[in-house]
Image (cartoon, rainbow, N blue to C red):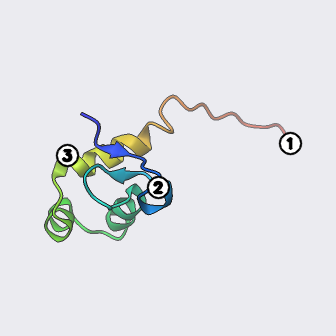
Amino acid sequence: MVKIIIDEKIRHEKPIIKGTRITVEEILGMLKSGMSYEEIEKEYNIERQDILAVINYVSSFVYGEEVYSIPA
């Protein structure tokens, strides 16, 4: 089931949790600020699976990424 979508009519095409106007960026900011999953779930009326979908969405951008040193 797709939980993260991009809709040109919602939040300027930023990725959001489907069925909400909550952006991936907002959830990451909440987690970064130290909010617990439970606090986010309660305050924004979302489920743990929504938060995990955000983390999976973002991690997909770095999965398999290779980093190389550039000689000076």
Image coordinates for residue 60, horizontal then vertical, percent = 44, 36
Task: Kindly identify the amino acid type of the residue bearing the numbered disc 1.
Answer: Ala
Q: Quadrant of residue 24?
A: bottom left
Residue nearer the viewer, 67 or 62: 62
Q: Secondary structure at mark 2?
A: loop
Task: Kindly identify the amino acid type of the residue bearing the numbered disc 2.
Answer: Lys
Q: Secondary structure at mark 1?
A: loop
Question: Please, is residue 71 above or below residue 22 in the view?
Answer: above
Q: Residue at x 20, y 59 (%)?
A: 37
Mark 3 highlights which residue? 49
Give the class, few, some or many, for how many residues have Cα within 10 Å of label 3's Cα (few <14, many ≥20): few
Q: Residue at x 33, y 67 (%)?
A: 30
Horizontal side, residue 13 vs residue 42: left or right: right
Task: Kindly identify the amino acid type of the residue bearing the numbered disc 3.
Answer: Gln
Check if mark 1's residue and mark 2's residue have beta carbons within 8 Å.
Answer: no
Horizontal side, residue 5 vs residue 40: left or right: right
Which numbered disc covers residue 30? none
Q: For marks 3 and 2, give the CA distance.
A: 19 Å
Between disc 1 and disc 2, whose residue precedes? 2
- Image quadrant where one finds the N terminus: top left
Residue nearer the viewer, 52 or 64: 52
Q: Secondary structure at mark 3?
A: helix
Mark 2 highlights which residue? 14
Give the class, few, some or many, for how many residues have Cα within 10 Å of label 2's Cα (few <14, many ≥20): some
Image coordinates for residue 31, horizontal then vertical, percent = 32, 62
Q: For marks 1 and 2, give the CA distance.
A: 38 Å
- Image quadrant where one finds the C terminus: top right
Q: Quadrant of residue 25?
A: bottom left
Image coordinates for residue 33, horizontal then vertical, percent = 35, 71
Of labels 1 and 2, the one closer to you: 2
Image coordinates for residue 45, horizontal then vertical, percent = 15, 63
Mark 1 highlights which residue? 72
